[in-house]
Amino acid sequence: MILIAGCQSLPPDEPTESASPATLSATAVAARRGLENRSVRLPHTNPDDLWGRIQHGMQWQIPENPRVADARDYYLGQTAALQRVLAERGQLYLHYIVEEVERRGMPLEIALLPLVESQLDPFAVSSQQAVGLWQIIPSTGKTLGVSTDWWFDGRRDLRDSTRAALDYLEYLHATLGGDWLNALAAYNGGVGRVTRAVASNEARGRPADFWSLPLQGETRNYVPRLLALSSLIAEPERWGLELPPLQNRPAFVAVPTGGQLELARAAQLAGVPKASLHALNPGHLRWATAPQAEELLLPPDRATAFQQQLAQLGKDERVQWAHYRVRRGDTLSRIARLYGTRVDLLREANNLHSNFIREGATLMIPRSDDATLSVASRAGTKMPTVKDYKVRPGDSLYRIAGRFKVRVEDILAWNSLNARSPIFPGQQLTIYVGGG
């Protein structure tokens, strides 16, 4: 999150406390809030330019006061970083956000809010566990119906998080009397805190606009950041800011997957780098699409190729799940070798925090996954044979390893043994013989 240190004093041109909203004209009320609608919108002369579209849809007259000026100076002091964010992430996410804000009839300044919240980073996580472009905390996400589970976090997903954030902003706007600045303050600091501040000021006959509210320092600086950023985007030439070109067209299309699919395989089918696929689908938390997910976002020019390749994909090339009931003496190492997967991925797939497994428990095991299959399995070579060996009197790990032509370290790993713990006659060991 981009931060501006320190709190500034209230602007000197605040209206007097004796002024009542009922006695002011609509323009004066808006000005007292530090915000007024533009009477004439900027011309949108180039339909291929996303910045022109944003400028055309901006509705606010940005106030000139110390807090906004300080925020603008901060951005102007790091123009290279701002341009990089706009160029790299703006081209992926901004068009979609603009479309959604515009569809709801909201001011297009709102589309810039993720730049303030997360620097347009869907992978951003705050110290308060706010996640994604819009920095949604777990409780708010749950209230807004954002799906979050072991496989998928909708707060990181572009479409889910944008829908939830805009729903919430519309609610805040309506709750706080149609005042966008107070709504933005509530988005950052909490609706209860802002509502109480408004009620407190009104009870004392004081103005209840954003600039007059006794809010915490972070919230007092939060709203000016968006206003400062909006002023830079609205008039980049005035401030000497060069905006990177952004095309006014979608950066992705949604393509059905027809079932659960490994992300590495999906990237291969689409002919895009895995990192690019992940950037467009940041809500997926694991190696494969979430079981409930029905589509992936892909660059528009790769959708047809993906669909063609997907149509030729065999059932055994998709993610398939085996269900294994743990037996007496089983270890994760033994089960992993049996199915040609890895212990760490068995733990991940079953949300295990250690190698401990309980007899009678059922494990989910991915049967087809480039990330989980062993090298031998992917190459089509012979898999090892599982041997149950009962320790005999006089046996040692070194003797057993020599007998089966395996390493002592492997026997320890396969059976979750401590190298310093002795083995004893009658003890059951699992040995994997052959393969390669």
Image (spheres, helix red, strand yellow):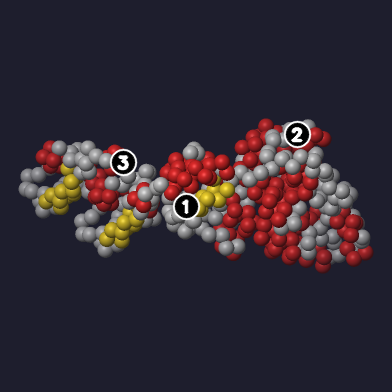
| Left or right of 71 on screen, residue 334 | left
Which mark is drawn over residue 257?
Answer: 1
Q: Taking the image as drawn, is residue 385 in sight?
A: yes
In the shown orientation, is residue 73 left or right of residue 297?
A: right
Residue 43 picture location, percent across and down: 82, 43
Tell me whether the residue at label 3 lies in contact with that at label 2, contact meaning CB atoms closer than 8 angstroms.
Answer: no
Labels 1 & 2 near each other (Cβ < 8 A)? no
Instruction: Quickly name the residue at label 2.
Output: 241
Residue located 87% across and 54% down the image:
31
The residue depicted at 78 percent of the width and 62 percent of the height is: 178
Q: Earlier in the sequence, mark 3 or mark 2?
A: 2
Residue at 65%, 41% in the rendered image: 90
Q: Secondary structure at mark 1?
A: loop
* Left or right, 69 with reference to 350: right
Question: Reading the chain from its start, which is encountered first: label 3 or label 1?
Answer: 1
Characterize the local packing of mark 2: few (<14), some (14-19) or many (20 or more) Cα atoms within 10 angstroms. Answer: some
Q: Which of these two is toward me, 53 or 224?
A: 53
Q: Earlier in the sequence, mark 1 or mark 2?
A: 2
Q: Nearer the viewer, mark 3 or mark 2?
A: 3
Residue designated by label 3? 378
Which amino acid type is shown beneath numbered disc 3? Arg
